[in-house]
Structure formats: structure tokens, C-alpha cells
Image: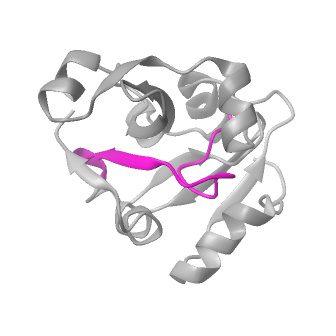
Amino acid sequence: MTAPVTLAEPIQQVLDACGCQAVVHRFAAGTPTAQAAADAVGCALEQIVKSLVVELETGGLALVIVRGDKRLDMGSLREQGVPVTRLARPPRILAETGFPVGGTPPFGHAAPLETTIDRALADSSVLWFGGGEVDVVFRLTGAELLRCCPNATLIDL
């Protein structure tokens, strides 16, 4: 691993407000996919977390947080009350969250997003998240994630 680095200010502000201290790393080869992040960090794919931005029937955006080894099931989301239509397009994600695809963090976005979290993440002791850039990741526990996303809805994905 590389030497620790600093997270983008909006992400760090959320961490500070929640009393969390993330372990942060930058990888020269990048971590734009869950598998690339797992390989770089040296962890299991299920310890990588994907922060996926989706479009809603209303035209707005929402965030769905899932394990790296899972595929997002839009039908399951709709059945559980999330009126999702599709994954948002990369230019819109960057414009509205302030972060690129492949580095989208679970919080600290330019505008707050309705957030849904896979319940399986809640009890995890080690989780790695996109750190706002395609070559930065940070580590938290499931409990810390929930503290930083207090208004999130937990569902089984």
C-alpha cells in the first residue's frame, strides 16, 4: 500500500462530524472498479463497497450502497420501494455529486442524495469505499458507515 493521503474536504467533513477516522490510501494504478480496488488493497471483493448513483422515476438521483461482489438488482430495489429507473450516466454523476464514477464516495456529495444501503454491510468490520477520486479508497466499519449516513434506508439486496 501507499502512504496515507487526505480525503476531499466534503468527505472529511462528514467523517469529522461523525467522529470517524478513516484509513485512506492512494494507488497509482487506480481503483476504478470493485475488483481493481480489492486487488490494490489486498482484500476480499465483498469488503469493497460500491456507491452507485441511480436515476429515480422522479428524474432525481439516489445513491445505492452495495458490496463489491454483488450486482445491483433494479427489480429488487423497486420491489422494496426505491423507484429506480436505471444507473445514472457518468457526466450527470460528476455534475451533480462532484465525484467521478469509480471514485464516488458514500457521502459528502455536492447535494444530499437519498441513500439506500445493503443491510449486509451493517455488521462488517472492514469496508473499503471510493474516496472521491478513481485512485483513492478509504476504510471504515459498517457501524461507522451507518453513523455517517444516518438517514439511509437499510434493505436486503
Q: Quadrant of residue 62?
A: top left
Q: Quadrant of residue 95?
A: top right
Q: Nearer the viewer, residue 56 or 79?
A: 56
Instruction: Residue 75 in the image: state x and y as whole percent.
Output: 20, 16
Magenta stretch secondary structure, dominant: loop
Instruction: Residue 22 in the image: state x and y as whole percent.
Output: 62, 67
Task: Decide whether residue 119 is among the magenta residues.
Answer: yes
- Please indicate, yes or no, whether residue 31 appears anywhere in the rendered image: no
Instruction: Residue 99 in the image: state x and y as whole percent.
Output: 73, 40
- Please indicate, yes or no, whether residue 89 appears anywhere in the rendered image: yes
Task: Decide whether residue 116 is among the magenta residues.
Answer: yes
Q: Residue at x 53, y 50 (%)?
A: 106
Q: Residue at x 40, y 72 (%)?
A: 147
Instruction: Residue 6 in the image: state x and y as whole percent.
Output: 82, 63
Q: Which residues are magenta?
A: 102-121
Q: Is residue 20 left or right of residue 72?
A: right
**Most distant residue in the left direction:** 79
